[in-house]
Image: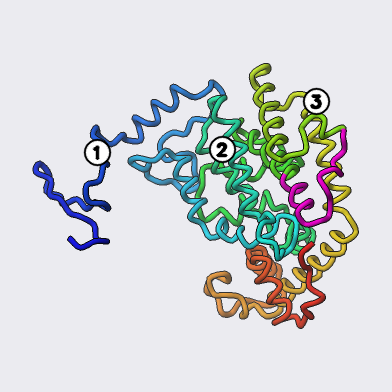
């Protein structure tokens, strides 16, 4: 065959032709495929006593047939990674709205870092890696554009308000039919929510806080808002001033807590340092006057967009409105659909619609740092 084409070889004992990517490849595996039941049994035997053990197709709202090879939480992980809400996190900010600096975190890179921290904890203590990673990657899928201010912006339109954790589990991710353990971890990853039903969910709750406290400070330094020396000495003396040292200290403190108590937590003084670190970030990053002004603009923009689509529902995509061309304007049901549409927008798309539909001047939009 010509260069660049796969090679094809015939199997003597099977009526199959096999394509190979490389001539002369060294890819012999041998053995046989391990079915889900075999992998399930082997994994269950290796997990910690309190780890979450998925069985068959898993506990799902809509019944499904088990996958022949993948475990139920592995299917969840695949579905999250292939989903549009997860991909759109690449266009949603972590702290800084639509930043020009591509090195600053997005919601997507934040979720990936939470998964890295979470699996670093779950692996040595024998928890389910697939469940931990699925919860971590999906935990912020309910966030609207332009950061946490979107929750205040969208809350008036929904009974009970807009909580990104609850909304992500109950609305954004609902079409994926994920296992209840995965959805519970997403719904309750926030510390203001009830405790998750699994130790994997509790690991993600700690991992989320560890990740954002450390990387939001690093991003603020990169953006010129702070310097590394601004971190209080009381925190730096415990965890250091480099993000890698900080995460290592916090992860080891969680592992030490599990080793000594058998429960997910964090030993002191690391837990005290984490609380002080977070309080410092709130004072110097999240609630600084410039951030508050940006949040006010975000709230005005997103409410303006929701109001626009409530008044003119025909301007929303048919897929969003359920292919209903006669959706009534001004109703609570239409407001729920408008919130679903606006909450799924990326930062830049929402900003562009602010100019196009609402007549905002570009200089008035929430931007950057």
* 21, above or below 125, in the image: below
Where does the image place residue 150, in percent across and percent down from the top left? 75, 60
> Mark 1 or mark 3, which has the lower sequence index?
1
Q: Identify the residue at horizontal 88%, vertical 55% (top origin).
A: 288
Measured in 3D between alpha carbons, the distance from the residue under mark 1 to the one under mark 3, in whole angstroms, is 51 Å
Could you say which disc has been placed on residue 28 in the image? 1
Could you say which disc has been placed on residue 132 in the image? 2
Q: Nearer the viewer, mark 1 or mark 3?
A: 1
Q: Nearer the viewer, residue 269 or 170?
A: 269
Measured in 3D between alpha carbons, the distance from the residue under mark 2 to the one under mark 1, in whole angstroms, is 32 Å
Query: What residue is disc 3 on?
Result: 269
Where does the image place residue 291, in percent across and percent down from the top left? 84, 59
Question: Within 10 angstroms of label 2, few (less than 14), some, or many (20 or more) residues?
Answer: many
Which residues are the magenta region?
215-233
Find numbered disc 3 in the image and state the secondary structure of the residue it sits on.
Answer: loop
Q: Nearer the viewer, residue 14 or 334?
A: 14
Is residue 161 visible from the viewing direction of this image? no
């Amino acid at each position: 065959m010509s260069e660049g084409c796969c090679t094809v070889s015939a199997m003597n004992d099977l009526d199959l032709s096999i394509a190979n990517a490389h001539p002369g490849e060294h890819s012999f595996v041998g053995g046989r495929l391990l079915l889900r039941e075999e992998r399930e049994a082997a994994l269950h035997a290796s997990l910690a006593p309190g780890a979450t053990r998925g069985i068959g197709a898993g506990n799902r709202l809509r019944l499904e047939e088990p996958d022949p090879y993948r475990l139920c939480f592995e299917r969840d992980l695949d579905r999250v990674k292939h989903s549009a809400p997860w991909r759109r996190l690449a266009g949603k900010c972590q702290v800084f709205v639509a930043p020009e600096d591509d090195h600053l975190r997005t919601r997507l890179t934040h979720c990936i870092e939470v998964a890295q921290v979470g699996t670093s904890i779950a692996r040595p203590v024998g928890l389910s890696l697939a469940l931990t990673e699925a919860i971590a990657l999906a935990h912020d899928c309910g966030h609207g554009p332009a950061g946490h201010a979107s929750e205040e912006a969208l809350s008036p339109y929904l009974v009970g308000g807009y909580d990104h954790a609850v909304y992500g589990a109950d609305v954004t991710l609902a079409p994926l039919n994920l296992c209840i353990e995965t959805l519970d971890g997403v719904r309750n990853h926030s510390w203001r929510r009830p405790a998750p039903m699994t130790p994997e969910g509790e690991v993600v709750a700690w991992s989320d806080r560890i990740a954002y406290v450390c990387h939001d400070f690093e991003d603020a330094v990169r953006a010129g808002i702070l310097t590394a020396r601004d971190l209080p000495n009381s925190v730096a003396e415990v965890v250091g001033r480099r993000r890698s040292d900080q995460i290592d200290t916090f992860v080891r403190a969680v592992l030490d807590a599990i080793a000594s108590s058998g429960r997910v937590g964090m030993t002191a003084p690391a837990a005290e340092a984490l609380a002080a670190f977070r309080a410092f970030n709130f004072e110097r990053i999240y609630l600084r006057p410039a951030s508050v002004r940006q949040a006010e603009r975000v709230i005005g923009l997103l409410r303006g967009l929701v109001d626009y689509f409530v008044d003119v529902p025909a301007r929303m995509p048919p897929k969003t409105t359920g292919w209903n061309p006669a959706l009534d304007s001004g109703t609570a049901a239409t407001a729920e659909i408008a919130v679903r549409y606006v909450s799924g927008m990326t930062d830049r798309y929402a900003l562009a619609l602010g100019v196009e539909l609402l007549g905002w001047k570009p200089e008035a939009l929430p931007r950057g740092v």
